[in-house]
Structure formats: C-alpha cells, structure tokens
Amino acid sequence: MSIKSYKPTTPSRRQMTVSGFDGVAKHVKPQKELVESTKNCSGRNSNGRITVRHKGGRNRRKYRIIDFKRD
C-alpha cells in the first residue's frame, strides 16, 4: 500500500495524505446467471400517475441472487 499525497492547491490539501488502494479492491462484474433486474416503477402508483418527483430516467438497478443456505 502506498501513501498518496496531493499538490497544495488549498491550505487543507497541503497536509492531506490518503492510503492508496492499488490492487486491493478491484471491481469484478457478477455472473449473469446470478443477477436479475429489479422492477422499476419510476415513482408511479397503481394508476400509473407520477406521485414521486425526481425518480425517472436512471440506470437499471440489478439484484444479485445469493444462496445463503449453501447446500
């Protein structure tokens, strides 16, 4: 693990250091068989009318299926 230091663009950045997570956490895509999409209603009720603001037009959310019993 390396220590990452920043250029002093502001007074608080002058002493700022952060641990570098090189190779610690890599993003790995889950298997397609173990992922299903969630039902998106985009803030609409049973009549189909928008009842919640700021809910439409975003990326599809996925649900990862996990076998907790592990038979």
Image (spheres, rainbow, N blue to C red):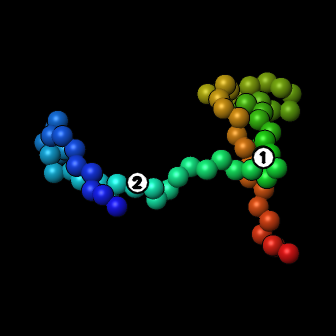
The x, y position of residue 11, in whole percent, is 13, 42
Q: Relative to 52, is 14 above or below?
A: below
Amino acid under disc 2: Asp
The x, y position of residue 2, in whole percent, is 30, 58
Residue 22 circle label: 2
What residue is shown at x 40% (from left), y 55% (from top)?
21
Is residue 48 at least partly visible in the picture? yes
Q: Quadrant of the C terminus?
A: bottom right
> Dots 1 and 2: beta carbons under 8 Å?
no
Left or right position of 57 against 67 = left
What residue is shown at x 34% (from left), y 61% (from top)?
1
Q: CA distance from mark 1 to mark 2?
A: 27 Å
User: Which corner quadrant of the image does residue 65 belong to?
Assistant: bottom right
Amino acid under disc 1: Lys
What residue is shown at x 65% (from left), y 29% (from top)?
58
What residue is shown at x 14% (from left), y 46% (from top)?
14
SS of the residue under disc 1: helix
User: Which corner quadrant of the image does residue 38 belong to?
Assistant: top right
The residue nearer to you, when weighing 26 against 71, is 26
Left or right position of 50 against 23 = right
The residue nearer to you, when weighing 3 against 42, is 3
Which residue position holds label 1?
32
The x, y position of residue 45, in whole percent, is 80, 32
- First in residue order: circle 1 vs circle 2: 2
The residue nearer to you, when weighing 39 against 28, is 28
* Mark 1 surroundings within 10 Å by alpha-carbon count, few (fewer than 14), some (14 through 19), many (20 or more): few
The residue nearer to you, when weighing 22 against 51, is 22
Is residue 35 at least partly visible in the picture? no
Left or right position of 6 against 35 = left
* Mark 2 surroundings within 10 Å by alpha-carbon count, few (fewer than 14), some (14 through 19), many (20 or more): few
SS of the residue under disc 2: loop
